[in-house]
Image (cartoon, rainbow, N blue to C red):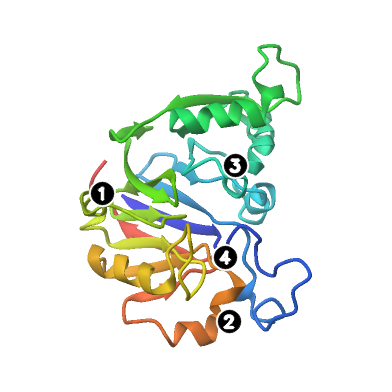
């Protein structure tokens, strides 16, 4: 069994390039400096069985990301929190409804699900007609749960004053939009082979890890490989920033694919 991780987007809420900006990152010809809003697809592939596709976050670029990567089915969508750069694409689950004739399973904290029902009120009126997105909402907390037999471990972090969730799926850990995390929660990531953590800039930020804070968290987790995501144009071009990072810590980029052996469930 293996886990295939596809980085669908690795940019912060504005994306990169940012509208109207002509900085050296936003004007870079390097495709690794072109970043859609952050999202990752985790495919758990078992021998002689269809892959279990689990998406983490569905931001404004959801439709484009699905088309670019040829994604035709999802067993579940995990939401880290309710900010628009992480949920705004959910209207486009309609395409998956058309293909499967079923609602798409969405897993999030009750607060986040309540926000979805307000944002996409038209989808939850109780009166369905063709063309409305259909989602089956699953409230979660900090207890592990399973999607199609694949164990998911939620991890609590804070995005400023807003509680958010990271997730561990076997040897893979994902933590975005974090400013603070307790050691007992960070412990849940220890032992992963790949750890993904967000940072938006080198200087301190009110609601996000700075670069040095993200590097510190990565060192505390101690994964053999760490990848940085949710990157803004403030950090500098891919090539330059890559040379500044410690061994074992790298920049993720849109379209990057990783494969990991997975012996658990």
* Label 1 SS: helix
Q: Left or right: 263 with respect to 123?
A: left
* Label 4 SS: loop
* Label 3 SS: helix
- Residue at x-position 50% and y-position 33%: 112
Label 4 crowd (10 A; few <14 / some 14-19 / many >=20): many
**Separation (CA) of disc 1 from disc 2:** 32 Å
Placement of 231 over or under 95, stated as above or below = below
Tag nearer the camera, 3 or 1: 1
Which quarter of the figure is the C terminus placed in?
Answer: top left
Work out whether mark 4 precedes mark 1 in sequence or the reverse, and give the earlier one: 1
Work out whether mark 3 precedes mark 4 in sequence or the reverse, and give the earlier one: 3
Please identify the residue farthest to the right as the structure is shown: 20
Q: Mark 3 points at which residue?
A: 87
Q: Are marks 3 and 4 in contact (CB under 8 Å)?
A: no
Q: Mark 2 points at which residue?
A: 237
Q: Name the residue under label 1.
A: 185
Work out whether mark 1 precedes mark 2 in sequence or the reverse, and give the earlier one: 1
Q: Are marks 2 and 3 in contact (CB under 8 Å)?
A: no
**Separation (CA) of disc 3 from disc 4:** 18 Å
Tag nearer the camera, 4 or 2: 2
């Amino acid at each position: 069994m293996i886990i295939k991780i596809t980085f669908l987007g690795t940019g912060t809420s504005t994306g990169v390039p940012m509208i109207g900006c002509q900085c050296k990152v936003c004007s870079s010809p390097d495709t690794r400096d072109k970043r859609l809003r952050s999202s990752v697809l985790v495919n758990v592939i078992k021998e002689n069985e269809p892959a279990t596709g689990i998406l983490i976050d569905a931001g404004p670029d959801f439709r484009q990301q699905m088309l670019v990567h040829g994604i035709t089915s999802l067993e579940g969508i995990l939401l880290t929190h309710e900010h628009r750069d992480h949920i705004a694409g959910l209207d486009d689950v309609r395409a998956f409804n058309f293909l499967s004739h079923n609602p798409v399973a969405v897993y999030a904290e009750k607060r986040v699900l309540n926000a979805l029902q307000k944002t996409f009120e038209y989808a939850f009126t109780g009166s369905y007609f063709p063309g409305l997105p259909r989602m089956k909402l699953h409230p979660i907390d900090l207890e592990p749960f399973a999607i199609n037999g694949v164990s998911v471990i939620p991890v609590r972090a804070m995005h400023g004053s807003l509680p958010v969730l990271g997730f561990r799926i076997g040897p893979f850990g994902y933590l975005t939009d974090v400013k603070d995390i307790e050691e007992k929660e960070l412990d849940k990531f220890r032992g992963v082979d790949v750890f993904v953590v967000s940072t938006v800039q080198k200087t301190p930020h009110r609601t996000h890890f700075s670069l040095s804070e993200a590097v510190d968290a990565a060192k505390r987790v101690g994964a053999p490989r760490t990848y940085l995501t949710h990157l803004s144009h403030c950090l500098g071009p891919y090539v330059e920033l890559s040379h500044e990072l410690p061994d074992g810590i790298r920049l993720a980029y849109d379209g990057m694919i990783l494969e990991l052996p997975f012996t658990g469930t």
